[in-house]
Structures are given as C-alpha cells and as structure tokens.
Amino acid sequence: MQSTLTDRTVLVTGGAGFIGSHIVESLATNNQVRVLDDFSNGSRMNLPTDVEVIEGDVRDDGTLSRAMQDVEFVFHHAAMVSVEESVTKPRACQEINTAGTLSVLDHARMEDARVIVPSSAAIYGTPDEIPITETARKRPTSPYGISKLATDHHVQRFDELYDLPTVVLRYFNVYGPRQGHGDYSGVISIFLEQAHDGGPITVEGDGTQTRDFVHVDDVVRANLLAATTEHTGDAYNIGTGETISIRELAELIRDVTGSTAEIVHRDRRAGDIPESCADVSKARRRLGYEPSVALREGLTSIADSTAVL
Ligand code: UD1
C-alpha cells in the first residue's frame, strides 16, 4: 500500500507488532521510519531491514526521548493489548497504555508532531444499540477497556488544550497476516490455525455472537488518512459496519481453507459481548475512510499465504 506521506520522519511505537508492522511497511519506502518496540509481543521478522529500530519501553523516558527526536508523525501502537493480561495486571496496563501515551503526547508537544493513537471497541463494553456510534455509552468491562477510554480522552484533549494535532482511531476486531505472532491472537487466527491443523474448530458458546472484523489493510489506510486529515482532536470508529456470527465465521473459514475440520462448541467465554458492529459513517464523512477488504477475500489471502507453513 502506498502512503500519502513522503519524506517525513515518522515514529511507529509498537512497530514490530501486528498492526504497527503493517503501518511501518506502508511508510518505509518513502519516509524516514523509526520503530520503538520492546519486543514483548512483536518480532524483528516483521520489520523491513531499512528502518531504524530502538529497543525499549515507552515508560522509559530516556529511550522515548531518543525515539521522539525530530519526528513529525507518531503512530503510537505500543500497548498492552491482551484483555486477559490486563485483568491480571491492571496497574501495569494503566501505566503502559495510559501513562505511556501521556509521555508520548508530552514529547510530541516538544517536537510539534502529529500523534495518531488507537483506541478500541472495548471502551463501549456491551452496547445498548447496534451499530455503535462514537457517542454511544461507554462502559468498559476490563482494565484494558478502561485504560483505552482514559487514553482516548487524553489524546483528544491534547489537541484542544495544547493545540497538538491528534487523532484517535477506535479499532473493532482487526485481523490479517502476522496476527498469530505473540501470546495474544484473535479468533480468526485461532480458527485458521485449527482449520489448517485438521481441527477441531472451537466455537465458544452457541456461536450466535457477532463481530465486525476489519482487515489490517483498511486499518492502515485509516491511519494514513488520520495523518493528513484536518479533522483532528476527534475519535473515529474503524470497522466495516458489517457483521458475521462466530459460528458462520467458523464455517466460512472451513470453506476458504478447504478444511474438513469438525466445528465443536465449548463454554461461552465469561464476559463475552453478544454483538459488536461499528457505525463508520463519521470516519467515512470526515476522514474519507472506506473499508475495502471483504471478509471472504481477506480470509482467503491469509489462508493462501499460510498454506505452506
Ligand atoms: C476484541 C479484541 C479486544 C477488544 C474487544 C473489544 C481481538 C483479538 N480482541 O475482543 O482487544 O477489547 O474486541 O470489543 O481483536 N472465540 C471462539 N473461539 C476461540 C476464540 C474466540 O469462539 O477459539 C469467540 C469469542 O468467545 C468471542 C469471539 O470469538 O465471542 C471474538 O473473540 P476475540 O477474537 O478474542 O475478540 P473479542 O473478544 O471480540
């Protein structure tokens, strides 16, 4: 994917991780790209050879200050991303996700850099209405969701209070190549692996729960649009506006992989939300965002690329 940014100095924190590495890939050819990553989840294998890599933690001010030097754009993807881990380590989650983002924002003020920060559908909790608009009630059910909600507010307020251009992108269920790396992966990479290994494909609960799965290429496009939009200081849902049930997803994955794996059901996950679907009309209207990868097409491309593994 070609970026609209050229000849810029860009920092991608968490750039060796799943989503961050796709952003790096889209920017590396035409820009000076620096990556700050502690490699707790990410991998050097995800990175092109020509990017500058700083290994370290966003909570370390010296490292962050080095990483932020002379940058014009920051895509801040370094975070604790596992909801489960946040439940066992709520304080660390707050320190990495919220305090870590505040440090990035402080440094961005000194450099006068635009900051694009992912938030999450987790901030909404169980929705009252579908599709979920940005103004929907927010009742996060995990320390992860709480940390993202606090972050989301801070990032928007920096635009208003300090005249620092910022954009918040609230990701729904992101999937795509490289998601399987690290301890934490979503249902699509789990099902693809299960289908590939001959099954069984394990559906939690009755499988009627729905999700809005957005391909990482669309998420990268949203980030690039956020880098140039004049509508800063605001938050945008990034999904597709389409949903599929988890049972149907299991069947679709069997279909695209040609697998005969059995689909089995096990206990519903505690705290699982029954429905999720983004209203993306604000991102469409103000950023020019248009989700373009259909689920079947996205799954097929991952299944093809992993078929030889
Ligand atoms: C996702 C995000 C999470 C975010 C939340 C916000 C991912 C990986 N996680 O969680 O960061 O906080 O949205 O709403 O994107 N399932 C199975 N079998 C499995 C694994 C999962 O049936 O082996 C089911 C789960 O019970 C759930 C659905 O698939 O109903 C999706 O699970 P998962 O991919 O973990 O994402 P969310 O729980 O939606």
Image: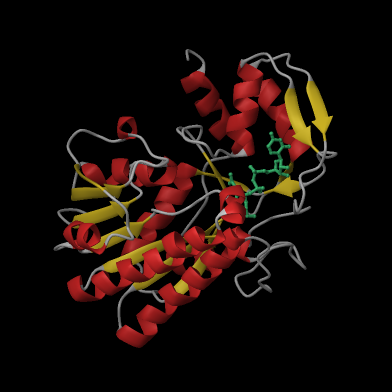
Is residue 176 shown left or right of residue 3?
Answer: right
| Quarter of the figure with the N terminus | top left
x, y percent for residue 248: 76, 34
Res. 303 image quadrant: top right
- Residue at figure coordinates x 62%, y 75% from the top left: 135
Is residue 296 visible from the viewing direction of this image?
no
Residue at the farthest bottom position: 161
- Residue at figure coordinates x 57%, y 49% from the top left: 85
- Coloring scheme of the render? secondary structure
x, y percent for residue 236: 51, 66
Splitting the image into four quadrants, where does ligand 1 fall?
A: top right
- Residue at figure coordinates x 61%, y 34% from the top left: 188
Is residue 32 shown left or right of residue 273?
Answer: left
x, y percent for residue 157: 42, 81
Res. 111 image quadrant: bottom left
Is residue 158 visible from the viewing direction of this image?
yes
Using the image, determine if residue 62 lies above or below residue 202: below
x, y percent for residue 46: 34, 34
Is residue 241 shown left or right of residue 19?
Answer: right
Q: Nearest the camera: 63 or 246?
A: 63
Res. 115 image quadrant: bottom left
Residue at the farthest right position: 206
- Residue at figure coordinates x 55%, y 48% from the top left: 82
Is residue 130 shown left or right of residue 182?
Answer: right
Using the image, determine if residue 154 lies above or below residue 294: below
Count of marks placed on residues: 0
Q: Nearest the camera: 66 or 154?
A: 66
